[in-house]
Image: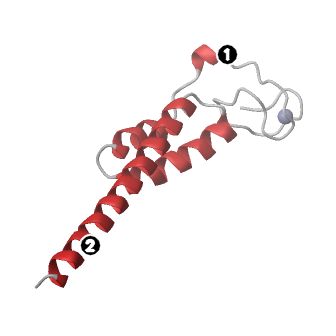
Amino acid sequence: MYCRNCGNVIDDNAVICPKCGVATGVSMQQQRTNTLAIVGFAMSFIVALVGLICSIMARRQIKESGEKGMGLATAGLIISIVEIVLYVFLVMVMMIVVAIALGHE
Ligand SMILES: [Zn+2]
């Protein structure tokens, strides 16, 4: 669609024109949830790294398009980061345990 204020072509879901910042008149009820936010949230439970990347991309898209799903994308981002931190911690603990075990041989 076209912006009523500046005439630039903007995303059909945009609530606010990214070019001039004027409201487009699209109601929040008509907003779609960003697909990447849903994918990122779901993937954060399965493959943390994929969830992290999708969530970061979703947040960037939502900021530009004004779509729904910012909360979902933020949740996916946090869950992914927590998982990665826990995984790194677990690997470090395992390495220390193995190092101690080998040291006693
Ligand atoms: Zn505009």
- The residue carrying mark 2 is 95
> Which of label 2 and label 1 is nearer to you?
2
Q: Secondary structure at mark 2?
A: helix
Give the side of residue 84 with respect to residue 9, left or right.
left
- The residue carrying mark 1 is 27
Task: Please report whichever mark, 2 or 1, sits nearer to the chain's N-terminal start.
Answer: 1
- Where does the N terminus fall, quadrant-wise? top right
Task: Decide: is 26 above or below 69.
Answer: above
Q: Tell me the kind of residue under disc 2.
A: Met
Query: Which is nearer the eye, 12 or 23?
Result: 23
Most distant residue in the front direction:
104
Query: Which is nearer the eye, 83 or 25?
Result: 83
Q: What is the quadrant of residue 58 in the picture?
A: top right
| Mark 2 Cα shell of 10 Å, populated few (<14), some (14-19), many (≥20) | few
Query: Which is nearer the eye, 4 or 94?
Result: 94
Which residue is painted at 77% across and 24% down in the image? 24
Which residue is painted at 63% across and 29% down in the image? 13
- Where does the C terminus fall, quadrant-wise? bottom left
